[in-house]
Amino acid sequence: MGAVVLIVVAGLFAVVSGINDGGALLATGLKLPTIRPATGVLVVVLLVATAPLVTHQVAVTFVTRLASFHAPGGATAMTIAVISSLAVVAWLSAKGRPTSLTLAIVGGLTGAGLGWGLPVSAGSVLLVLAFGVTAPLVGGSLAWVLIRVLLVTTSAHGLWRWHQAGFLLQTVAYAANDGQKMLAVFMVAFGFSDAPLPYTSLAAALFALGTLYGLPKAGRSLGRELIASRPPHGVAAELAAGVSVIACAAVGMPVSMSQTIAGGLIGAGVAQGSGRVRWYATVKIVVAWCLTLPASALLGWTLAVLVQGFASMGVS
């Protein structure tokens, strides 16, 4: 029964990942007609399905390095973690504070693991948090440099080509890193340790459904609210986020693509004057990020303790 519940929750998590993340991957380039949204969604889905066949170290980090979710009771703890992360993201979204689902699942996994009594690695949790903070800062710094170079050296036609390269780079980065949080839940739900194509394809298809539903809203959030965006800002943010997130994937560290893209947009905006950045929206998003992980961890821990307590009462 527990495995069936986790499978259903894993499917829901993949759809919500599409709603939360898919639009962020496309939003930065919406002002350039180079890549149609339908084509962009297709590319994202194909890479989400196939990239884990090459490397799925980030998924392994979610499943084994934060806590051992292949241990007895791990499936129940994973279910609690995912439900906790979805609940916190839904709560913050309802408050008008869009946030990172990756931060939420890291918090949920940590809290549920502790509450369920699984061995949780404090060192790994702190390392993931350190990379999570660093990635948007690196993305912002790279975008600050890149937009200056693009504006000086690139024509309008050349910018389109850089947009194509940037979109592909950030999509590969997402599939190799942030997107593997979906695979991690499926790994525990179905009990495998590698990345079989049927399961990665299932996760990708559900992700596509969420992306199609959430694209308009996510596009407005990143593409318009953070900065008074022009096409070069989006291209610089794509390239910067792609480089930053791929570097983290190379060492198996999960980071949030939406956070890193936001950092890139802010860095690109600041490069042309801080007045271009809408600081009120920026502060609102940063506050949501700061709330997400501890809220998810606390809820995950609380639910795990309660479920385990009820289970013990039932046994006795």
Image (spheres, rainbow, N blue to C red):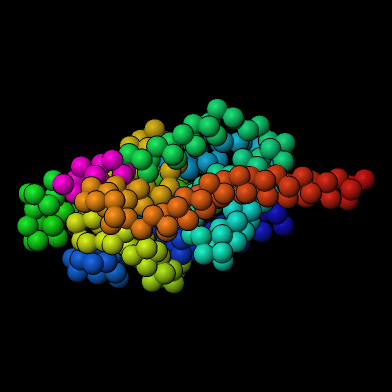
Residue 316 percent location from the top left of the image: 92, 45
Residue 308 percent location from the top left of the image: 79, 46
Left or right of residue 147: residue 242: right
Residue 145 vertical position relative to residue 237 in the rendered view, above or below: above
User: Which image quarter: residue 24?
Assistant: bottom left
The magenta region covers 139-148
Residue 249 percent location from the top left of the image: 38, 39
Residue 98 percent location from the top left of the image: 48, 59
Q: Is residue 142 magenta?
A: yes
Closest to the observer, 35 or 155: 155
**Which quadrant is the N terminus positioned in?**
bottom right
Q: Residue at x 62, y 49 (%)?
A: 295
Q: Residue at x 29, y 69 (%)?
A: 37
Residue 286 appears in the figure: yes
Number of labels in the image equals: 0
Q: Residue furthest top?
A: 123
Left or right of residue 212: residue 83: right
Residue 239 appears in the figure: no
Q: Residue furthest front?
A: 275
Residue 236 vertical position relative to residue 252 in the rendered view, above or below: below
Q: Main secondary structure of the magenta part?
A: helix
Q: Residue at x 60, y 61 (%)?
A: 91
Q: Is residue 108 magenta?
A: no
